[in-house]
Image (spheres, rainbow, N blue to C red):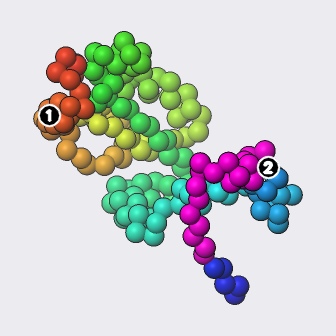
């Protein structure tokens, strides 16, 4: 087995010579032995390396996936739909003005997803949400199995907003619509 030495180099991004040498338009930005594979391949490999979870994180993700039943659902051969329904700050009145974001109910997401769910044969939905309302609304879709992480939601949601106000992450003019 070939050994690979890892080299750590400190780089000064204010150094124009470095930037010119390694700029995206520079042929030296991709190591010579990989240049024939092109930019897309190189960018994909670098991105995959940067986003690869540490062994400890990978073990935690696997453990939680097993606990939720997500691993079994993925291994079943039936497609699993991942759905993120974010309420939290999206329910702030200011967000409707600032970012045109709203507290979109689960029903709107499901209306858009149902054609794909039916055509792909999805039986399990992995639901990421900060809202107890969204979790409660899953009861309207008994033909699907929703898996989600048990988190402090509900009455604790308000505590998160209160803490954000105390830390001045929000000001007291922005209320959560419930």
Q: Secondary structure beneath disc 2?
A: loop
Question: Label 1: how many residues lie within 10 Å, few (<14), some (14-19) or many (20+)?
Answer: few
Q: Is residue 43 visible?
A: no
Circle 2 sits on which residue? Answer: 26
The relative height of residue 155 versus residue 33 in the rendered view (above or below) is above
Q: Secondary structure beneath disc 1?
A: helix
Q: CA distance from mark 2 to mark 1?
A: 48 Å
Residue 38: percent from the left, percent from the top?
81, 52
Bounds of the magenta segment: 6-26
Kindly report the secondary structure that dominates the magenta region of the rendered protein. Answer: loop
Instruction: In this rendered view, identify the residue nearer to me: 59 or 2.
Output: 2
Residue extending farthest to the top is: 97
Instruction: In this rendered view, identify the residue nearer to me: 98 or 62.
Output: 98
In the image, taking residue 56 as reference, residue 169 lies left or right, namely left
Q: Quadrant of residue 2?
A: bottom right
Task: Please report contact status of discs 2 and 1: CB closer than 8 Å, yes or no.
Answer: no
Circle 1 sits on which residue? Answer: 166
Q: Quadrant of residue 9?
A: bottom right
**Is 17 covered by the magenta stretch?**
yes
The relative height of residue 118 versus residue 15 in the rendered view (above or below) is above
The relative height of residue 82 versus residue 115 in the rendered view (above or below) is below
Residue positioned 82% across, 66% down in the render: 33
Residue positioned 44% across, 59% down in the render: 71
**Is 13 covered by the magenta stretch?**
yes
Residue extending farthest to the bottom is: 1
Residue positioned 36% across, 32% down in the render: 86
Q: Earlier in the sequence, mark 2 or mark 1?
A: 2
Residue 17: percent from the left, percent from the top?
71, 52
Residue positioned 66% across, 84% down in the render: 3
Which callout, 2 or 1, points to the residue nearer the camera?
2
């Amino acid at each position: 087995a070939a050994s690979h030495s890892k080299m750590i180099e400190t780089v000064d991004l204010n150094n124009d010579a470095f930037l010119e040498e390694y700029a995206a338009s520079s042929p030296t930005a991709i190591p010579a032995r990989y240049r024939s594979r092109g930019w897309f391949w190189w960018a994909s490999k670098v991105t995959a390396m940067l986003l690869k979870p540490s062994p400890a994180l990978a073990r935690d993700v696997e453990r939680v996936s097993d606990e939720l039943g997500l691993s079994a659902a993925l291994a079943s051969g039936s497609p699993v739909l991942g759905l993120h329904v974010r309420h939290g700050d999206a329910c702030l009145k200011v967000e409707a003005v600032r970012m045109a974001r709203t507290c979109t109910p689960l029903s709107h997401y499901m209306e858009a997803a149902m054609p794909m769910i039916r055509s792909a044969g999805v039986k399990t939905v992995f639901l990421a949400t900060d809202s107890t309302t969204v979790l409660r609304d899953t009861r309207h879709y008994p033909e699907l199995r929703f898996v989600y992480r048990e988190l402090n939601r509900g009455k604790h949601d308000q505590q998160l907003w209160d803490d954000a106000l105390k830390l001045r992450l929000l000001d007291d003019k922005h209320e959560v619509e419930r």
